[in-house]
Each structure stands twice: as C-alpha cells, then as structure tokens.
Amino acid sequence: MRFVRLLAVLVVTAAVVGLLLWLPDSTPPERVALDRPTIPAVFESGAPSATWYCAASSFGTPEPPAHEVVLTNSSGSSASARLTPFGETAPAEGVTVDVPANGATTVDLAQTFLTTGLSIVVESPAPGLVVEHRLSDATAADQVPCATLTSDLWWFPALNSSRGATALLTLFNPFPTDAGVDVEVVLDASARTPAELSGIVVPPRSIKVVDVGAVVQRRDVFAIVVRSRSGRVVAEATQFFDGSAAPRGLRMNVGVAGESPRWVFAGGFTGEGVAETAVVVNPGNERVSAEIRVTPYGGSATAPEPIVLDIPPLRYGLVDLSAEGRIPPIGYHSVTVETDGAPVVASLLTTITGPPAAPADPAAPAPDSSVRPALGSGVGIATGSPVAAGFWIVPALDASAVPAPVVFVHNPFSTPVNVAVVPIDAGLDPAAQSEATTEVEIQAHDSVALTVPAASVAGQLVGLRLSAMAPFVAERLVTYPGQDELATGSAVPGRSERSGPVLLPALRPNG
C-alpha cells in the first residue's frame, strides 16, 4: 500500500510541477504547461506532500563514505518525514524524524540503519520540506538536492574517466516492478550504446551501481543519457578523483530529466589556480548554435562578447572559460547558455589546483564575497537552472567553514529586483529572524554574491530562504570545515499558489 500511495503522490506532484510559466520581459506572465520539471523543486503550498529520492551512496573508495541526509524546513511549523531505506542490506522498516520549525535535521544513515550502501526515499506531509544528501570522507565531499521525481530520461552532460578518476552511475528503482534502461555514451565525435550498458535491468525496490568509467575509459569529458525501456528510475552520478592526476575531490550530480534552450549558472569564477569549463550537449538531430555568455558581477553593461559553439547532432561542445582572455580573472561571473531555439543540456565544471593570487598590496583587506574562496584544491560540478523563480531555498549547511560558503543570486531580466534574504536557523525566534532578514537589490542582468550568516548556536546548520516579487536564479557554493573541497550547484526553486518557476528570457535576437 505504501508504494501505491507513493506512486499516487508522485503523479500529483509531477502534475503540479508541470505548471510552469513563461515570462518575456515586455509582457505579462503566461502559463505554459511543460511535460516535466528538469531540476528538483519545492512547493510552498498547493501539493499534498513531498517525496524526495536520494540515490547515490558510494563513489568507489575501498571504505564506504559517510552518507548524510539533510532536511531543511523553512516554515514556521515543525515537520515530520519518513525515511525508507533501499539496498541489499536495507532493514525492513524506515524511521520517522522531526524537523524543527525554521530549522534543519541531519540524519547519518549508517548510524540510523546500521548499514551502508543505501538509497533513501523521504516522504513528508510538509510540501515545503527540502531534502539534500551528502557523501564525504576525510578529504573529499559533495552534496546535492535529492531528486523530486522518477523519470524515463536522465542526462549527464559531463563525466570524467581520466587517470585517477572513477565515474559511477547509481540507478535506483523504488517501485515494485522491474525497470530496464540503456545508457548511451556521447563523445565529441561519436555516440553509441556499448553492449555493457545496454538492457540494464534494475529489479524492484533496488539499486544498481554501474561503473561507467570502466566502459568508457580515459576520457577527460564525455556525456551519457539514461533511457528507460520499461519503468522509471532515479539516476545519480558520483565522480571521485584520487589526486594522482587531478586534485582529490568528489563530484555528485543528479541527472537532468529534460532539455532547455537556455540554462543559467548564477555563479562561477576563473583566475590563478582555477580551471572552469562549460560543457553543452546537443541531444537533437540537427546542428545547434549555442552562445556562452559570461557576465562579470557588476559588469553587465560591459560584458564580453559571447562565445559561440557549433555543436553537431548528438555531440557535445565545450569551452575552457579559464583560457578566455576576454573573461576577467578576478571576481565572480554568471554564465548563460542559450541556443538558437533548440533544447540542450549543460554543465559547468570547476577544478581548483591552487590558492588565489596574492593581493598586489599586502596591506589590502581580506577578500570579501566578490572574490573566489581561498581554497587550494577541490572539484565541483553544476548543472545550472533552466528556470527563474520568485523564491528559492538554499538547503542548510555548515556556515562555520573557512572560507565561508557563498550564495550566488542572478537577475536574468531587464529590470532590477529586490531579494529578501531570510535565515533558516532554528535558534532564532520570529522576532530575531525578522531582525536578521536583509534585502539586496540586483540590477538588470547582474548578480550578487552573499556569504551565509553564522549560526545562532555553534554547530548548527543554517539555510536561506530567498524571495522577491520578480523571478531570479540562485545557486550556492558549499565549503567544508577542515577540507580543501567545494560543492557547486543550484539552490531549490519554489512554487506557491500565487506563482511558480518561469522560463528564462531570451537574450539572443533569434532566441
């Protein structure tokens, strides 16, 4: 009965998520139904419950990593959530946890279920609950929002199987019938479905981990698409770098369940010790012209000319942004990928190989939020956002890390937007939360970087709720106490009864 209920909730949730909007700069919003969401989304209201799927639990190390689920509750009422484990050693019963009002709860899965290698389904009657999961060991860590749907299609625009890299694909089937999938590999000059990746069967209520890097060997970049022959799954990739040929670190990403002609990455950076690469995959049957538009923070009026990629059918194109002299090597920038109308998928890769350049003036003040974090190592991957929204949730994180985590907020539209920044901190009563709320103005086509405020209670996680009267885009850069490592990626867009996510505006004349 639980799975019948789960499927019913999934159908209702997918239908609600499908009601997205289109908002050109010069006309009122017009509702347009889409087939499916492409990134995890949260519902402030209008949905009966929330269901999240956390698939990956390993990244190829001899010892299993720590696996934690972080539940963030931005509402003024406490919430409960049911965690159901899946896997060969999963116990028969799940657990119910409480999440405080305006706070977060972290669940260590190994301690809770006394085993490892688990995928998790989180169900809550509170539709506004946000669920993220984190994998880590002593020197590598990453975290991503869990999936909010199952799908018959999952894109991974940028994987790596070079020396010292492991690329694992976790396929999670939470349903009581088999699922069968093919994994097609997209290279720069060809596309194929290897026999080892064809007709993969994922039994009911189970997990299958596929070592894609063992099949597609010695590739700095390749893409894959998971297509279901039958059933629906959740797909998530973990990429571990052991430090032998690149900085030691971990990249996690849930697959993208659809394509879009426009993607925005609210925050990125280049400069000394940084390699930043944009990867764009053309899933269609015709050539695609894609523009990569990099806009320095505070420099929207003088942004450099876009970089143009011409991508053949079912191929990928990439550009090393850190090698582009037109992009300032200091400070943050946003990255917009826009085609001539054809849908694509995209990723932004960040690799840190050394600390930032020392200031020319030793007496200069310490770097602020406009300068990239002073990390000496780390890897990150972001899949961007195809939508803007009137509110976003930044899942709770450890704000005590040095350097501090950063939140990127981007305004893709042609009029300024004022964004309210509300801390999600269980140690704050309503009056203290109101006092701690700030507002930031973002000019047209510009962005700002915000540091996450310190927790009111030591050791407590802090999230953010960002909201405005007009849509915008938010991402976060997570850092970790005691580690040279980072996680990059989208925050979670929200929908209320009044408004929902909106498609990004066209910037190209023919977009």
Image (cartoon, helix red, strand yellow):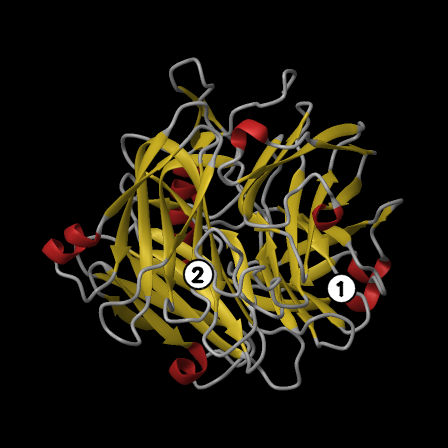
Say which residue label 2 marks: 365
Label 1 sits on residue? 212
C-beta proximity under 8 Å, tags 1 and 2:
no
* Quadrant in the picture for the C terminus: top right
Q: Residue furthest left?
A: 431
Pick whichever, 133 or 396, lies toward us: 396
Mark 1 and mark 2: span between their CA atoms?
Answer: 46 Å
First in residue order: circle 1 vs circle 2: 1
Amino acid carrying label 2: it is Pro
Residue 315 image position (x, y, % from top left): 81, 41
SS category of the residue bearing label 2: loop
Residue at x-position 60% and y-position 63%: 356
**Alpha-carbon neighbours of circle 2 within 10 Å: few (<14), some, or many (≥20)?**
few
Q: Residue at x 58, y 82 (%)?
A: 64
Please indicate whether residue 29 sits to the left or right of residue 242 in the image.
left
**489 displayed left or right of 221:** left
Q: How many marks?
A: 2
Secondary element type, mark 1: helix
Residue 497 in view in this figure: yes
